[in-house]
Image (spheres, grey):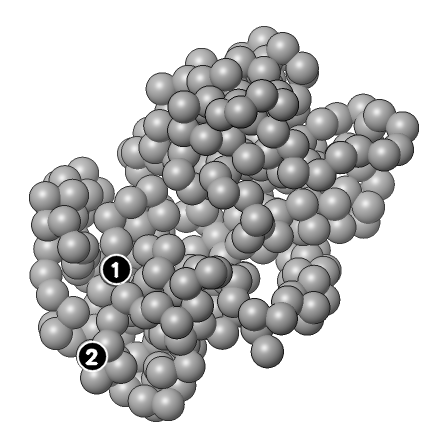
Amino acid sequence: MTANHEARPVQALDEAPARELCGIILHPAGHTLSPILHQAAYAALGLDAVYLAFDVAPSALEGAVAGMRALGVRQLSVSLPHKEAVLKLANHISPEAQQIGAANTLTRTDDAIVADNTDWVGVLRTLEPHGPWKGRRATVLGAGGAARAVVYALRHLGMDVLVTNRTRERASRLVDELGGRVGSINEPYDLLVNATPLGLQPQVDASPVGAEELQPRALIFDTVYRPLETRLLREAAARGCRTQDGLDMLVHQAVEQIRLWSGHSPDPALLRRAADHALQGDTALR
């Protein structure tokens, strides 16, 4: 995993080999906090495991999954841009991942690799404290893998979901498969979710919508977590909106990932503290 265009580890393991090897595949890999969350959970739970980040270009995805089998990797988190493509490489697909049409988790069980989606669990657990949501209106920005998990969770909460995306055809396909309807940002909403990468480092000055399109008193949920306070959330607060950053979603989906392979669930508050501590040193947040 060292040649150009192949999966390459972002960090090296300088200690005795652990019993279980886990990690994350994404491209590019610089923005991920997942190793910090998972290692904190392993330490708290007493799990003999290590978690590494691998920068995997789209052309190397098939080889990376083959490497997972060959090396006996227990679990791989799957991030951008692989969440939809990875479904074709798994032996089995969970009902949730099948319906969502995207996976953020590959878990090895014996000689099989199972694709699952815990992103929707992360969305659900993040929004539940702000509820109840049944019968209320949600607008989702984006139509990719993350947006599909968001829509699945919002429908699970009983919300009336509207999807808007720069490519209307992709939004139409999403709602045809998961429910909801295609619309515009100008329609009323109680919840606005940014499920695009706009605002993610290094594009910290980008926002998926103009400040004038933010509706006061609505909850604005940005799934981007780095930076923690995005331009979208800053402008939302100034407009009198409630805000929710993307870190809780990341934490809760990680908790579910760890439960899938280990049978144990770490304390979400512990993982949140570990991530907050790591972000304190991020100069892009100051």
Left or right placement of residue 188 versus residue 133 in this view: left
Q: Secondary structure at mark 2?
A: helix
Q: Nearer the viewer, residue 64 or 139?
A: 64
Disc 2 versus disc 1: distance between alpha carbons? Answer: 12 Å
Task: Please tell me how crowded label 1 is: few (under 14), some (14-19), or many (20+) other residues with Cα within 10 Å.
Answer: many
**Residue 40, position in %: x, y?**
75, 50
Indicate the amino acid at tag 1.
Leu
Which residue sits at x=70%, y=51%?
A: 36
Q: What residue is shown at x 55% (from left), y 52% (from top)?
A: 31
Residue 235 in the figure: left or right of residue 225: left
Question: Considering only vertical position in the picture, is 46 above or below 205?
Answer: above
Residue at the spot of label 1: 141
Crowding near the residue tagged with mark 2, few <14, some 14–19, many ≥20 C-alpha atoms within 10 Å: few
Q: In the image, what residue type sits under mark 2? A: Glu
Which residue is at 79% across, 33% downward? 13
What residue is rendered at 50% in x and 57% in y?
A: 249
